[in-house]
Structure formats: C-alpha cells, structure tokens
Amino acid sequence: MSRQRKQDKVSATDSPTIRCAIYTRKSSEEGLDQEFNSLDAQRESAEAFIASQKAERWVALPEQYNDGGFSGGSIERPALARLLRDIDADKIDCVVVYKVDRLSRSLMDFSRILETFEKRNVSFVSVTQQFNTTHSMGRLTLNILLSFAQFEREIIGERIRDKIAAQKRKGKWAGGVPILGYEIDRSGPSPHLVINAKEAARVRTIFQMYLDKGSLQPVASELARKTWVNKRRVTKKGKKLGGRPFDKASLHKLLTNPILTGKITHKGDIYEGEHEAIIEQDLFDKVQAQLKYNGRTGGIEVRNKYGALLRGLLRCKTCDAAMTHTFCGGRNGQFYRYYRCTRAIKNGCDVCSASTLPAQEIERVVVDEIRGLATDKSLLAQVLTEAQSTICDELTTLERDRNDLQREVGRYNKELRQLITTGGTTPAETEQIADLNDQIEEAVRRQPELDARIAELNDETVTHEEAKAAFADFDTLWNYLIPREQARLLKLLLSAVDYDAQAGSVSVTFRPTGIRALVQRRMEEAA
C-alpha cells in the first residue's frame, strides 16, 4: 500500500502545469477609475479558484486580459483579441472567467470562440457556473446559459431603445455626439444641450453664407479660407476627434440638421426639443429649399456654362415655374439664346403663353432696371428701407450671439466654482479647471469684437446720396466684368425676376444685402 501511494505521488508531481489565463470584462467605463473596481473583483475571484486547484497544478498567468468599457455583444475587444493570439501561440492551457457572459453574450460568437479553444485543446472554466466542456452534458449546459445571456442582452437593448425613444419624444437629449454650435451640460440631473456661443455664431454665418452663394462648394472653399473646421471633441480617454475642414458632405449634413432649430429627431420623426435653437425656422426652411432646388437642377445656375445672366432668377409668372436658358443654331455659325418656361417644355407650348423669350432682350430690360435705381427716387427709397431692415436683422443676430456668450461665461464660472469648492486636487480636475479658465478667457476676448461689430452696424446707414452715386456709376463696373461675372453680380443684386407674358411686363425683386454690398464696394473704391 505504501508503494502504491508513493507511485501516485510521483505521478502527480510529473503531471504538466496548467497555464490559466484570466479574462475579465465590464460593459461600461463607469467606476473603472476606482482603486478596486469590477475587473479587480472578477480577477480576484478567478485567482482564488485557480489557487483551489493547486493540487491539479493550475497556475494563474501574470498577463492580464481586461476589457473595460466593452460590450459582450461584440467580439471586437482588444484584450479578447490578445487572448486569442496568445492561445494560437500555445501560451495558454485554460481560460478562466467569473461568469460565462463575461466572455460573450452572443451564442454565435461564443460558439466560434469555443471552436478556437477546442482546436488548441484549451479548457474553459467559469468560476460561478461549474461545468465541463469536454463532454456533451457540459456543452448543453453551457449553451443553455449562453441562450439566457443572449436573451438578457437583447432585453436590455430593447429597454435602452425604448428609453431613448421616450426621451426624444419629450424633446430631451438622449446622448451621442453634439454638433457644431452645442455642448453637453452634465451639471444637472440629466445631460442636456447648451449653446456654444462662438460656434453658434459661426453656424449662423454658414447658413447665411450658403443663401448668399447658393451652392455648397463656394461655401466650403470660403470656410477653408477662413480655416473654420467642424466640431472638435475630446473623448473620456483623452482622444481628440473632429476638427476637420468642411467638405460638401459635412457641410450638407450641418445645413440639414433640425437640431439647430431646437428640434430632436428620432427615426424620421421630429419633436420639439428642450434645448435653445441656433437657427430660426424661417432661415432653415430657406436653406432647405435652396438645397432641394440645387438637388433637382444640379446647381446649374452656379456653373452657368454659357453666361446666361438670368439663369436661376427668371420665372414665368403665369405658370409660377422657372424659365430655363437654351439656344439654337443659326446661319454662319451663330446661335440665338432664349429663355423657355419649364412647364411649356414638359407639357407643350399650348399650356403657357410665355413659350420662349429672347435672352438678350429680357437681360437688357433687367440691367436697365438696375441702372434706373440712380434716377427712380421711390424705388431707391424702397431698396434702402429693405437694406436697413437687413442691418436690423444682423444686429438682432449679433445681440443674440452676445447674449449666448454671456450665458456661456456664466455657466463656465459656475462649473469653475463647483470644482474649486469640491477640492479640484486630482489631475483630471486640475486639467478641467485650466480648460475652463481658457474658455472663459476666450469668451471674454470675443466680447469686445461683438460689441465693436454691433457699434459698427448701428452707424452703418446707407444714405440716399451714396446709393444714387453707386448706381450712377453702375455701367463702369458692368462693362468691366465678363459674362459669367455679370451673372454672379445679378445673382448678388436680385432675388427674383418675374416675367408676365399676358401683361407683357417684367418685375424685379432686389436683394437688400446685395444693394448694401454694392454701395459699400463703391464707397471703398471712392476712398
């Protein structure tokens, strides 16, 4: 008997060591900065279990495989990838987890991982759920546990989606990345969007710039010249994202986002949001109409290959439809330009009395109407009144920017006082205090700029004499420009040209911002 016990002891001593890798996971990052967190607790339990198997020569490997802040619904996790690489390199004999769902909550993903384990003869152990994957009953038990884990994950996902939908229906911010113009205020019971005054001012400028230029590409080019970029942000891990120059795609995404009008969107539905709007609904609707028009026409008025002066401006008043530019060839290689009603093109000439309109004649009439501003006192007075109205609108926007800036400074000061009151001694708090001081300094620096522009606009009144002088010298500027530049000038000065075929009349609608720009240009040249 004593000889048999001695042989058993020798056999146990000669058995190979079982190298055990401990894998831990936590879905959220909350609490990971604590001295002893959930990952530490999982590892401690696994180490205790491995120590209990000392007689079987189980040894815990020093390498740590911790995935903090990663969902079990996906296998795209850095520590798990490292674990599988070490298994392929034959560095591991057994994988130990606290619970099965720490490795995966997806039955399909878990089956694939287990196949990898089996190919490499690697055992799998769950500390709190005892089973053996080497026989059929153990695998059945494991699959049942995994099915419940996947069911639990899907239920949690449904609850989260329902919660987000309910929040958005009430107009609340339900998480995600804020767009240019907004920040997330987390000082209250729930996070909500607040206006970033500097970014909001830029957003308003971008919207107005698009209406003035009428196309995405010129706006993107102008933003590149100004070195204006899209939203910058820093993740919780300190990674810097965004801050890229605008292109047509990112610019279009900004211009079409209803959040800027104080709305919240969810799966195609739009709800009134709790946050403050940056863009007025009327301005937003005008931009959407221009984007829609460019989408249908491909921005033809911007390219204007043949220098048609009224492309994008001329409309048939009878049909309330646009008139498009066309031409036909004549003798000796000449061609004749026309404007045709688009409704007549689609449905035949009989449906529209306008039919075709000689391009040179209608363009001459419109240019003469602009020249007439120098002599038509009533028309010039009306245009100047509209220009002054535009100045008032800009003043309103700037004063709104100034109010946003003042509220922003107040919010930053409040956060700063809270940090200082609670201590502000950790490195993260110290960095946050420094960042708040920088933001306050930047906001205070912008205040005089806004005040100066507001004071400038208060003094910026175009007199009747100045406007008359500018348009009296209109021919000098007009004859200096090539046809494409003339077309751009008309687009700057006019917002619409309506042709009434039945009355045989043309009505011109001036763009107030264009009138003011032309007068200012004339004044600068004179100076």
Image: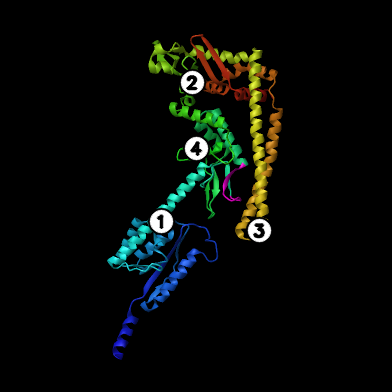
Q: Which mark is residue 311?
A: 2
Say which amino acid is labelled 4. Answer: Ile
Q: Which mark is residue 91?
A: none
Work out whether residue 66 can be spotted: yes
Name the secondary structure under disc 1.
Answer: helix
Q: Which residue range is magenta in the image?
A: 186-196
Give the Cα separation between the discs numbered 3 and 4: 40 Å
Q: Residue 152 carries which label?
A: 1
Give the Cα separation between the discs numbered 4 and 2: 35 Å
Horizontal side of 52 relative to 31 (left or right) equals left
The location of residue 9, given as percent across then percent down, is 33, 84
Residue visible at 41% across and 53% down in the picture = 155
**Badge 3 or badge 4: first in the primary sequence:** 4
- In the rendered view, would you say 57 is above or below 416? below
Say which amino acid is labelled 3. Answer: Thr
Name the secondary structure under disc 4.
Answer: strand
Q: Which part of the image, by quadrant, shows the C terminus?
A: top right
Q: Which mark is residue 270?
A: 4
Give the Cα separation between the discs numbered 1 and 4: 31 Å
